[in-house]
Amino acid sequence: MLNRTFGNKQRKLNGKWLMEKKWLRYSKSKDAVYCVNCCLFGGNDGREKTFTSGTSDWKNLSSLLKRHESETCHINASSRAESYLDIQSGKCESINKKLSESSRITVNNNRHILKRIIEIIVLCAKQNIPLRGHTAENSNFDVILTAFAKNDEILSDHLASAHYNAKYTSPDIQNELIGICAEHVKEKITSACRNCPFYAIIVDEATDKSTKEQLSLCVRYVDDNCCVNEEFLGFVECPSIKGTDLCANILSFLQEVDLDILKIRAQCYDGASNMSGKYRGVQALVRERSPHANYVHCKAHCLNLALVHSSNIPCVRTMMSTVQDISFMFDYSAKRLNAFCKELSQDTAARAEMEQRTKLRTLCETRWSSRADALATFKNAFSVVLHALETLQEDGDDKAGQYLGGILRFDFIIALIVAEHLLSSTVALTNLLQKEDNDLLHAVEETKVVVQLLRNERNDADVWDALYDKASNIAAEFDIQPSRPRRAARQNHRANPDVHTVSDYWKVTLFYVFLDHLVQEIESHILSNQDRFAALYLLPKRLHQLQVEMLPAIYAAYAPDIDHTFESFNNEVARWKVRWNIAENRPVRLQETLQKTNKDLYPCIYNILAVLLTMPPTSASCERSFSAIKRIKNYLRSTMRTERMSSLAILHIHKDMDVDISKIINTFASKKGRKLDFF
C-alpha cells in the first residue's frame, strides 16, 4: 500500500480495517478502497458516493467508514449481497426459483384437475354411461366428479373455489374433450393403417333413433405381424343415400383421416343397388378413383339372402308368420305370458329342453340364420304353447283360438321341423363369417362344407325318415293325423306331385325343394368366383392343383402389388412348390401361410397372400357399430348430434384401447387460450 502525506505525517491504509469490514475492498491500481456491496448491489438513488467511486483519504477513513455503514443505501445493498451469497451457497432459493416453483405447482394442479375430468369422461364413454341428466347437478358426470372430489383435495378445492367459466365441466368442454379423445384413438388406428402397403374399406348405412341416415366406415388391414385388424373409424351423417353422395362422403372421410385412396384393395358392402350398382353404385364410383379396389359382396348378407329366398315356400312362409305372431302375442301381453309361464312350470320336460328360458324368441327380420334358434325354442315348447293357447281360448281370447287352429295342422308341424333342421345347418357358418380374423378363402371353403353336407343329407334317406318321424310323433301326441293336400289332376297353383304316401309328398314338395333352393342360392351368392380367388392355389395344401396356365391370370390380378417381372414371379412359384414339397408341416389357413412366408425370399407370393387376407369377407364390423348406435343414441338421447355420437362410439367400441391423457391435455391446452395454465 502506498504512503500518503497528510500535513507533516505519512499515512497509509490500515489492514485491520479490511479484516473488520467484510464489505471493504482495496484496489492496488487505484490505491483506493471501495464498498463491494454498494458497487455490485447498490442502486442509483444513494447519496453516498464515497465508496462507490473509491476513496484514499486515509486520514479521515475511520469517520467515513462509520458514516457509510449507517447509510440506508449501504444497508440495502448489504442485505442484497447477503441474500445473493445465501442463494449461491444453497442456503435459500432465489425469487425467480420461488416464482417458477409456484408456477410449476399451479400447472401441475391444473393438469391434475383436468386429468380427473378426462378420466371420468373416458370412463363414461367406454362404459356407455350418459354424461348428462335432466339437470346439471344430477347428471352422471357431476355425481361421479363429486365422488372423486371427496378423496381428492386439489379437485375438491377447484370445484369449490374456481370461477364458473374456469371449472372445465360445462357441456361444451365435455364435447370438446370427447372429440379430442376420439381423435386420439382414431389417429392410433389410421397411423397403423398408413404403415401398411394396402387396406380395405367396409361401409354400411343405417338409420339412427332420430331418423338420420348414418354411414359407418371401418378399415381392414394386415399389420407387420400378419395379424388381421378390422377397426371402426366413425359415423358420417348422409342427407342423401344416392350412390354419388355416399361415395363422396366415403372419399371425403378417407381424406380427412389421411388415408391414401390408391391403397384400397377391396371394398365390402351389402347388395343394395346404391352400393353394388355396376355403373352408378358406390363400388363403381370408388373404382374410378382407385382402380384396384375390388368389390366384395358381404358374404353374411349373401347367406341371409339365400335363406330368405329359399324360405319362400308357401307352407314355410305361413309357418314362420304363425310362429312370429304367437311369439309377439306372448311377449307383449302380461296376461298371456303368465299363462305361458304357468304351463311351462308344470312341464318338466319342456323346461329342460328350453334351457332355462321362460319366453319364446321372436323371429329376427334381418338375421334369418338366428331364426333357427327361435324355431328350435318354439319346437321344444310346442306342448306348452298349445296348452297355454287352450287356456286363453277357454278364457275368451278369440285370437288364441285362431292361433291354436293354425298350429294344430300337420303341414305346420312338418314345416317347423324341416325349416328348423335346415336353418340350423347354417348357424355355424354364420358365426364364422362374422369373425374379424376370418378371410375370404376360409369362408368359401366352409361354405362348400355346408353345401356338401346338405347334398349328403338329400341323398341320405335316413335323414328324411328321422325328420318325418319326429314330426309324426309330435302330431300323434295331439291326435293330429299326418296328411297331405288333396291331389287334383289339373292343379297348377300348388305342388301336385304324383306320389303315393304322405311322407313322399312332403319329402318332394318341402324337403327337396327347400334344400335344393338353399344350395342353389348359396352357390350363386357366396361361391361366385373372382379372378383373385385363383391365388388360393398358392396355399401349400392346394399347390398340387396349381397349373402353369393359371400363373398369368394370378399375376395379372395382383400386378399392381408385384414389383417383379412375370419371369421372376414364375421362378418364385417354382421355388415355393419345392419348399412345401419337402416341408413336413404345411399350414392350412391363409393367415398361417402368410406368417410362415419370408418376405425377402418370396416377395411376390407374400404380397399376393397379404392382399387376399386384407379382403374382408363380410361387413359384420359395421353391423356391430350399428348395435353401438342403439345403445348410445337411444330414445332418451335422441337429440345427440352425429359428431358427439361418432366420438362416443369410437371410445365405446375401442374400449380396450388406452387413451394417453397427458397427450389429450396437451392437445386441449394448445387448441386455444385457456383460463388456466397447463404448460
Image: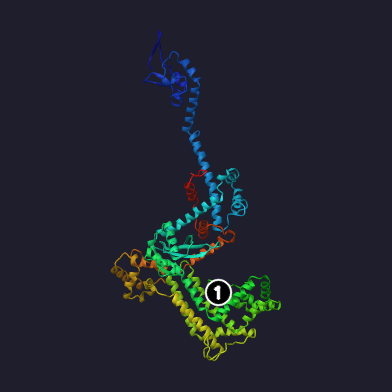
Rendering coords of residue 434 (x, y %): 49, 69
Up the image or down, 295 lies above or below 347; here it is: above
Residue nearest the observer in this picture, 549 or 87: 549
Rendering coords of residue 632 (x, y %): 55, 60
Say whether residue 528 is visible: yes
| Residue 161 placement, left or right of 429 | right
At label 1, the amino acid type is: Arg
Q: Name the residue furthest left.
A: 567
Rendering coords of residue 418 (x, y %): 55, 81
Up the image or down, 243 lies above or below 305; here it is: above
Q: What residue is disc 1 on? A: 371
Determine the residue positioned at 47% across, 23% down: 45
Coloring scheme used: rainbow
How packed mark 1 is, by other alpha carbons closer than 10 Å (few <14, some 14-19, many 20 or more), is many
Q: Name the residue furthest top.
A: 8
Residue nearest the observer in this picture, 361 or 225: 361
| Residue 673 placement, left or right of 605 | right
Figure quadrant of residue 243: bottom left
Numbered disc total? 1
Question: Secondary structure under badge 1?
Answer: helix
- Quadrant in which the N terminus is drawn: top left
Residue nearest the observer in this picture, 46 or 591: 46
Figure quadrant of residue 13: top left
Figure quadrant of residue 502: bottom right
Rendering coords of residue 90 (x, y %): 48, 34
